[in-house]
Amino acid sequence: MKLGSKLRCVQLSDTGKVREHNEDAVSHDPEIGLLVLADGMGGYNAGEVASGIAVKTIMELVGDACRRGPRSQPDPETGLMHQSIALRDAVSRANKIIHQAARTSPQCEGMGTTLVACLFWDDRASVAHVGDSRLYRQRQGQLEQLTSDHSLLQELVDRGFYSIEEAQRSTNRNYVTRALGVEPWVEVTVQEFDAQPGDTWLLCSDGLSDMVEDEDIHLTISTFGGNLQRAGEQLIQLANEHGGKDNISVIMAGVVEAFPESSGIFDRIRRLFG
């Protein structure tokens, strides 16, 4: 199913005010509803290599899986749909490739990347993430963070050592507990959510979420409505105005209309005469 008319998508990336080069990588394919954002780290230019490998691998593997067609039955072991499994497996494969490259190329030693990816299908979205790159969804005037950071600070919040407000003021926000390429195997968090017309979905690196409060993200999306390009530009501008201490990347997707999968002859007949 082609989703190009169902989704509006934009991607933007900025070096920020402090870093000399941009180690983030972003890509999207609105026809299959795939959005991928990675925030690289480790060594001069090595982070850029890691994030680039991650995005390229996932775009290719998930694209191939989507072209093979949907499967309607969930996996009996995990309960996840085919789309979620394809996304998870692509992220795991990217991890192996990055880890191997880091082991065999001295200039890439220690490299890794955080990642968040989203695949839309059948009025739903599969989300996979590793690290502290985030996904938000704004629906009916409410902004919700759908991913939970794989970070030391988030673990301390979960255990009650910090409140959310205290965590937002912390200067030690960037110690991630998971990243692609650091180990031969990585645990990928995969979730499935419903998607509705009017939703705005935002993938971002921590260059945005560390610099701009959630309330300001919410207000920016609300202010510019369906103008995703302008909203994305404003979010990057806000991050730079607040210090721009890291690379800043965003991918935004607006759901224009529902995109249910056709499941049989009655759906085809209904579309023919609808």
Image (cartoon, rainbow, N blue to C red):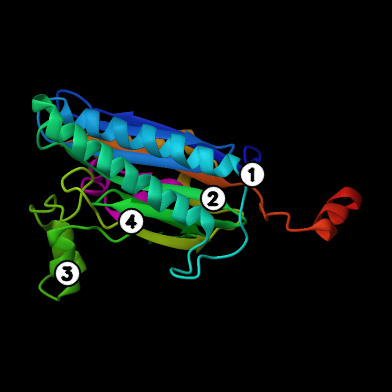
- Nearest-to-viewer mark from 4 and 2: 2
How far apart marks 4 and 2 lie (CA) works out to 26 Å
Q: Amino acid at mark 1?
A: Lys
How far apart marks 3 and 2 lie (CA) works out to 30 Å
Residue 175 place in picture, x, y as percent: 11, 52
Residue 76 place in picture, x, y as percent: 50, 70
Viewed as shown, does residue 112 lie left or right of 59? left
Give the residue at mark 3.
Answer: 157
Circle nearer the N terminus (3, 2): 2
Tag 2 near tag 1, CB within 8 Å:
yes
The magenta span reads 201-221
In the rendered image, residue 193 lying in the magenta stretch gets the answer no
How far apart marks 4 and 3 lie (CA) works out to 19 Å
Residue 242 place in picture, x, y as percent: 20, 40
One can see residue 222 in this view: no
Circle nearer the N terminus (1, 4): 1
The numbered mark at residue 209 is: none
Q: Nearer the viewer, residue 175 or 46?
A: 46
Viewed as shown, does residue 185 lie left or right of 232? left
Q: Helix or strand or loop: what does disc 2 sit on? A: strand
The numbered mark at residue 6 is: 1
Q: Amino acid at mark 3?
A: Val
Q: Amino acid at mark 4?
A: Glu
Tag 4 near tag 3, CB within 8 Å:
no
Give the residue at mark 2.
Answer: 120
Circle nearer the N terminus (4, 2): 2
- Nearest-to-viewer mark from 1 and 4: 1
Residue at (39%, 45%) from the top-left corner?
A: 90
Circle nearer the N terminus (3, 1): 1
Q: Amino acid at mark 2?
A: Phe
Q: Helix or strand or loop: what does disc 1 sit on? A: loop
One can see residue 12 in this view: yes
